[in-house]
Amino acid sequence: MVKNQHAARVSLALIAPDIAPNVGAIIRLAACLDVNVAVVEPCGFPFSPHAWRRQAMDYARLARVEHLPGLGAFAAGLEGRRAVALTARGDLALQNFAFAPGDVLMLGAETAGLPAPAYDLAAAAVRIPLRAEARSLNVAQAAAVALFEALRQTDGLPGEAPT
C-alpha cells in the first residue's frame, strides 16, 4: 500500500478491476478527495495511464496510485489497517457502519464484484442501500458514495477541520 503521510486516512483498493474508464474515474475521485488508491491485479485490461487517462484527465498527476501484483501483496501492505468490502451483498448498510481512520475500502470488478479471497481479508461487508429493483451502482459511483461517507465520519474531507 502507498506509504506516506496519508497512511492513516481512509483509502481505496480496486481489486481485479475490469473496466479501465472506471479505474480512471476512481483515480480522479481519489485525487480530488486526497486519498490513496491501490490497483490490485489481475486487471481486465493492460494497466497503464494510457488505459485510463481520458477519465482521470490531468487529475492523475495529483493522485497517489499504487499498482500491486496481486491480493497477497495487497494483504501484506495492510499492516494492521482494516479492509472493508464494499459489496451489493453486504450485511451492513453504509450509514450504519462505523468507519475508522486508516480503513481501506475494497471494490471489486464491475462485472464480477470482489473475488472470494478478498472477503477473507475484510473486517466487514458494507452495502449502499438501493431500491429493491436496482441491482447495483456503477463501481465509480459506489466508490464516491462510500468514500464520502467514510471521510465524513473520520473528519477526513479535504478542507475540513476536525470537529
Image: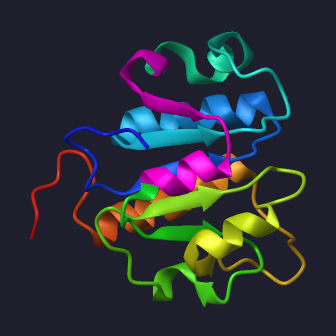
> Toward the viewer: 138 or 10?
10
Identity of the residue drawn at 46% across and 60% down: 104
Residue 129 is covered by the magenta coloring:
no
Identity of the residue drawn at 68% across and 21% down: 52
Residue 68 is covered by the magenta coloring:
yes
Query: Looking at the picture, does residue 79 appear above or below residue 85?
Result: above
Q: Is residue 66 left or right of residue 72?
A: left
Residue 40 placement (x, y as % from top left): 65, 42
Q: Which residues are magenta?
A: 60-77
Residue 11 placement (x, y as % from top left): 42, 52
Identity of the residue drawn at 24% across and 46% down: 158
Identity of the residue drawn at 82% across and 50% down: 110
Query: Quadrant of the rendered structure where residue 163 is?
Result: bottom left
Instruction: Give the image's coloring scheme.
Output: rainbow
Residue 12 placement (x, y as % from top left): 50, 50
Question: Would residue 13 be visible to someone looking at this image?
Answer: no
